[in-house]
Amino acid sequence: MRSFIKVLFSLAFLFGLFTNTVSAEKSTAENNKVMNVAGQDLYVDVAAATLWGSPNTARPLDAPSLSNPVDLRAWTTSMSYDEKLWLVGELETQALYGQKVHVLEQEGDWVKVAVYGQPTPRNELGYPGWMPVSQLTTSDRFEHLDGKPFALIKSPTAWLSKTPNGKKKDLELSYNTKLPVLIKLHHSIAVLTPEGKVRWLDTKDAAVYKSESEIPGATGEQLVKEAKKFLGLPYLWAGASGFGYDCSGFTYTVHKANGITIPRDSGPQSKAGLIVNKEDLQPGDLMFFAYDEGKGRVHHVAMYAGEGMMIHSPNTASTVRIDPISTPAYAVEFAGARRYVPEQ
């Protein structure tokens, strides 16, 4: 009886919250019409925003990644190998739903942003790139809950629903997406969207934490287990979501979802953390590969999976997979290893 009353109270609370957010949502829509948002902190309003090296360079076939909402599955599966290869050097990174960005500058319908939480020597605020301004939003209520208890998606992707039972699906979100928690019930979690709407996640898809510091420190073996969730996922240059990863987006995201922040790109990743000798490799350690037989610029990163194997997202022609570290093409380019897992 007590649990039933608790559910009724929770639903009544959420109904009141929902009605109070209507005006906030209208205000958000009006704010999106502001001509110049440079200098503002805003939030990503699509499952994963794909950031470009420059504005207005996208092709017509890239439209599913530029809309709101996006359809990343349609986009990635519709491209041929050559069409996906064209993205190399054109894209920068991805930012997930609800992720905060700082708008650095604006050109018409495009904005250059820095993604908070993606460390890079290229910008002290976060990873920079261009995206459509229509993929950004904000609301006073969402901003107020920034830093409060949150749900962190741990499944490769998960559906955001309009109802607690999950029957009215709204938006498919990525692993590592973080949203403020309103109420946690037995089978579902009420979260707030960047627009200020109340939506629901299944408890099997997400973990709830009071703060980022509360995320349990992962062991190397746990990182490898998390990484294996994505076996078979097609490679995407600049990908940092459960819809596709590049090599460093993969290692960055797996660490980030487990409470460890590392640099976004393979080069900077190879210069931080604890230096590890090849003979001392442990599961979860990152292995780096460089041109000129390991003496040049670092261009690839993989995660040591144990027993002489590594898991990685190698290139446009491939998927997340496990390979022997003795594979000739990689063995000759080995350039060192680093460990980011805290000492247990």
Image (cartoon, rainbow, N blue to C red):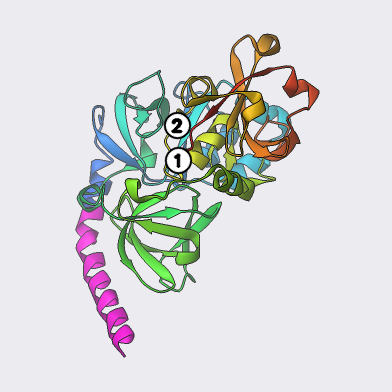
Q: Residue 219: x and y, percent? A: 52, 45
Q: Residue 169: x and y, percent? A: 48, 64
Residue that carries the numbered disc 2 in the rendered image: 262
Which residue is situated farthest in the bottom direction here? 1
Quick one: label 2 or label 1, which is nearer the N terminus? 1
Q: Is residue 218 left or right of residue 291?
A: left
Q: Residue at x 49, y 39 (%)?
A: 255
**Alpha-carbon neighbours of circle 2 within 10 Å: few (<14), some, or many (≥20)?**
many
Is 16 inside the magenta-drawn segment? yes
**Dot 1: what SS?**
helix
Label placed on residue 256: 1
Q: Is residue 169 left or right of residue 294?
A: left
Q: CA distance from mark 2 to mark 1?
A: 7 Å
For the magenta stretch, what is the residue range?
1-25
Is 102 inside the magenta-drawn segment? no
Against 242, residue 336 (above or below) is above
Name which residue type carries label 2. Ile
Q: Residue 284: x and y, percent? A: 58, 38
Against 202, residue 318 (above or below) is above
Q: Residue at x 68, y 30 (%)?
A: 316
Against 194, residue 10 (above or below) is below
